[in-house]
Amino acid sequence: MDKLGLIPVRGAGAPLAGTSIDKAKGTEGSGFGDILKESVQSVNGQMQNAAALSEGLMAGEHSNIHETMIAMEKASISFHMLTKVQSKVIDAYKEIMRLQL
C-alpha cells in the first residue's frame, strides 16, 4: 500500500486478502443457498404458528384475537416477500442464461 492508501487490484479468481481458499469457495456454510433455506424455514415456522393460533382461537383455547391476527399478518407478509424474492431469483437466472459467452 502506498501513501495514498490505495490497494492493488487483484485478479478475478484471486481470494480476498486474509481469507483462505475454502472461505473463498463458499464452504463456510453461509452461502446464498443456506440463507435461502433459513428464510424458507422461518416463513414456514411463522405460517405454522399462525395456523396453530387460529385453530386455538376457533377451538376456544384462548380468546386473544389480536395476537392471532398479528401472527397471521406477519406470516402473510413474510410469505409475500418470499414469493417476491423467488421471482427476482428466477428473473436473475433467466438473465444470466441469456448472456452469450
Image (cartoon, helix red, strand yellow):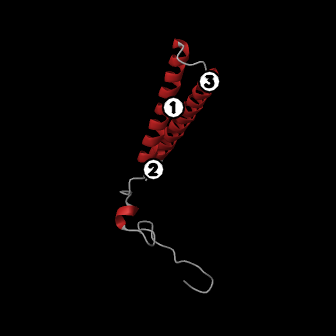
Residue underneath mark 3: 69
Whichever of callouts 2 and 3 sits on the residue coming sooner in the sequence is: 3
Residue underneath mark 2: 100
CA gap, disc 1 to disc 2? 41 Å
Q: Of discs 1 and 2, which sits in the foreground?
A: 1
Task: Report x, y in % for residue 29.
Answer: 38, 53
Q: Amino acid at mark 1?
A: Gln
In the figure, 68 relative to 100: above or below?
Answer: above
Mark 1 and mark 2 residues within 8 Å of each other at the beta carbon = no
CA gap, disc 2 to disc 3? 49 Å
Q: Residues within 10 Å of mark 2 (few under 14, many from 20)?
A: few
Q: Residue at x 63, y 83 (%)?
A: 4
What is the quadrant of residue 69 in the picture? Answer: top right
Task: Report x, y in % for residue 1.
Answer: 54, 83
Whichever of callouts 1 and 2 sits on the residue coming sooner in the sequence is: 1
Helix, strand or loop under label 1: helix
Residue underneath mark 1: 46
